[in-house]
Image (cartoon, grey):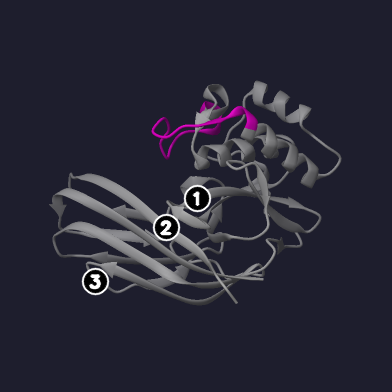
Amino acid sequence: MDLLEYRLETESRFAPPIAYHAFKLRCTPADNEFQHVLMHRNSISPECTLIEASDGFGNRIHYGSIADEHTSFRIVSEGRIECHHYAIHEPQPNSLFLFQSPLIGCTDEMRETARELIRPTAQETATEIMHWVNRHVEYSKCVTVNSTSAQWVFDNRKGVCQDYAHLMIALCRAAGVHARYVAGLVEGEGESHAWVEAYDDGRWTAFDPTYGKAISIGYVKLAHGRDVSDCALNRGRFYQWTTETFSVKSVVKKIDL
């Protein structure tokens, strides 16, 4: 068991200012069998009332709105989590995680690659695909956006953690392995991170294709879905023209027991 302390800060800046802003947040860690949330706190600037709920995948969400004119929207989520070995038992996976989704489709060439990577078990297949993606994709910032598809990453072999995850998921699904996208944080300092959960023998286990390793501990899960479009940390809606710039900072550190 590990004890992790986390802090996640996201900020949107608007020019010109906006007068009304509705938002939905996925910045609160999931509470499940591998991570137990001991405490957490969310703060919003400008201040407003937060309503807690869950989405269709069971992720914890908060939503609200701000009616006063503002030039920035800042969220800080912080807390402490007790972490165990990464595994989530589930009797039957959702069939959605076996089919194409908005950003995860498959070409014939991708299907052929997936067939070559199939191994005797789903776990072994996911591991083989993870290593293939890690070897064949170059980590490159500023070449992709949130709407970049798995097919583009397969063809161009460049991207960031989100793109590594999308390509691994596409190949897993083409190989008959249920796979889903995970948004969260990883130990250290940086931004948010993305990885993959694959299903085999009654449980979801986790893989990080960006680093080429199976995940055991040191990660904080915030949300999962079909692809990144289901897992946005901060999704807002405003009813006037503006330019938005968005930044994310995170710190996750292990606390000695």
Residue 59 x, y percent position in the rendering: 52, 63
Residue 147 in the magenta stretch? The answer is: yes
Question: Of label 3 and label 2, which has the lower sequence position?
Answer: 3
Find residue 217 and report its image quarter.
bottom right
Amino acid at circle 3: Glu
Q: Residue furthest right?
A: 120
For the residues labelled 3 and 2, the Cα–Cα distance comes to: 21 Å
Residue 180 x, y percent position in the rendering: 62, 49
For the point 29% across and 74% down, the residue is: 49
Q: Nearer the viewer, mark 1 or mark 3?
A: 1
For the residues labelled 2 and 1, the Cα–Cα distance comes to: 9 Å
What number is the disc on residue 250?
Answer: 2
For the point 67% across and 39% down, the residue is: 130
What number is the disc on residue 193?
Answer: 1
Q: Is residue 166 above or below residue 248?
A: above
Q: Residues within 10 Å of mark 2 (few under 14, many from 20)?
A: many
Residue 148 in the magenta stretch? The answer is: yes
Quadrant containing the C terminus in the rendered view: bottom right
Q: Are marks 3 and 2 in contact (CB under 8 Å)?
A: no
SS category of the residue bearing label 3:
loop
Q: Nearer the viewer, mark 3 or mark 2?
A: 2
Residue 89 x, y percent position in the rendering: 73, 64
Question: Of label 2 and label 1, which has the lower sequence position?
Answer: 1
Q: Residues within 10 Å of mark 3 (few under 14, many from 20)?
A: few
Amino acid at circle 1: His
Question: What stretch of residues is rendered in magenta?
Answer: 135-152
What number is the disc on residue 47?
Answer: 3
- The answer to whether residue 238 is seen in the rendering is no
Magenta: main secondary structure equals: loop
